[in-house]
Amino acid sequence: MLKYDKNIQSVRGMHDYLPKDTILWQYIENILITILGSYGYKEIRFPIIEDTNLFKRSIGEVTDVIEKEMYNFTDRNGNNLTLRPEGTSGCVRAGIKHGLFYHQEQRLWYLGPMFRYERPQKGRYRQFHQFSAEAFGQIGPDIDAELILITARCWKKLGINHHVSLELNSIGSLSSRINYRKKLITFLEKNLSNLDSNALRRLYSNPLRILDTKNTKTKELLLNAPILSDYLDDDSRVHFSELCQLLNLLGVSYRVNPYLVRGLDYYNKTVFEWVTDSLGVKKTICAGGRYDELVQELGGYSVPAIGFSIGLERVILLIQEINNITILHKNIYIDVYFISIGDNSRKHAMLLSENIRSTLPSLRLMVHHGGDDIKKQFYCANKHKPQIVLIMNEKNALDKTIILKNLRSKTQEILKHDAVSERLKHILHITSNSTDNK
């Protein structure tokens, strides 16, 4: 007989989020969804498992993601599949498959888990969650500016705008990067003793990734390295200049970071990151950029595109770090707790509670079940910190009345069943919205 460990643990770097945690997740997600919707972006959903070749073709085979971070497996039919390490590739694949890009502009958003086999640390997990937006079919810098404006509006609504800053750069076209790449390699070859092992490994395969090194010695060396902006093609230079002018006009503060590149091969022209110093060390909470060649690279038409991804775990850490109590406690507790005493009253309590919910859909109302005595029911109610307790005994059930106890004002009243919703609406300042439950 097989023996198992008593407790099965979660996979390292993959976390459970309990009800007290998901309240904050839902709050953040609802804000992001509402803001994206107000700009005309629509939700798209696609699988978390894709053909491995999708990521090899889009991300680039000589990247950390492809070389050592992907969760790959072979299914029973011998197909090589991968848990998605990022969302843009799957979004583009879905758009091509369903003809979303043919003579059309698309503004899309999506939300969900991504997977990378990395060493888990604060804010970086093996299953992590991103909220992303992608805009297809627009070539000018105005759409770049719009996505940056959207993210800025998100930070303001979340109350973290004073704790983040925008870094911006242009990495040009593929041809301009090839020219710059040669100059950078020549410079680095003359300084091999100052390069760490990661830089040496990337020297000939992906030298631009050395630009965003965390190694202090390499950073100092790069201060004398050729600057990518000096090798930009004219189109990229004009595009970036116009974007900066737009952001200046719109009042968006930013810093041009000449060492900012993206870790995935499909980017071109504009790249940007929102970073924070409020998590102990500098962390990126949102990153994005243009990828005008990706749709064609994956088999579609030539379609310009730009997008961003927000790391939700890091946003949550930032909110917790700045101790935004208003957000952390929002919607933790319920509005009304319903107590009933007696078999007949329990049935009528359920009927009345459903009628109240139909009239006041936004009301957070919890009904006690199980037939406990009134002392136990009040004990349970207090755990949820309601403002109102509704009490129904057998006499109330016969009379079609209810006892309403306001715990905040310490008052009590008896109401007819058909008057309860209106009274709750008045006390709790809830907007009624009758629904048809037929």
Image (tube, grey):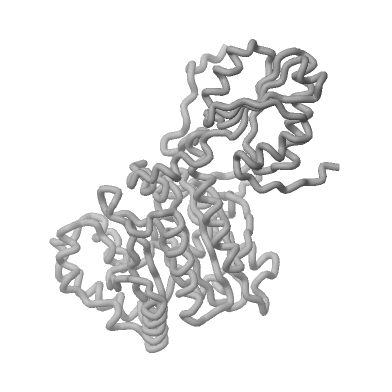
Which of the two residues, 397 or 355, is positioned nearer the viewer here? 397
Which of the two residues, 282 or 50, is positioned nearer the viewer here? 282
Horizontal and vertical percent position of residue 61: 44, 61
Horizontal and vertical percent position of residue 262: 38, 65
Horizontal and vertical percent position of residue 74: 57, 45
Which of the two residues, 185 or 48, is positioned nearer the viewer here? 48
Count of number-bearing discs:
0
Question: To which quarter of the image does residue 366 belong?
Answer: top right
Quarter of the image for the N terminus: give it. top right
Residue lying at 43% horizontally and 67% vertically, measured from the top left: 265
Would residue 323 appear left or right of 225 to someone viewing this image?
Answer: right
Residue 175 visible? The answer is no
Residue lying at 19% horizontally and 73% vertically, measured from the top left: 225
Q: Is residue 248 above or below residue 107?
A: below
Name, please, the residue furthest toward the right: 438
Residue lying at 47% horizontally and 43% vertically, measured from the top left: 127
Residue lying at 48% horizontally and 20% vertically, measured from the top left: 7
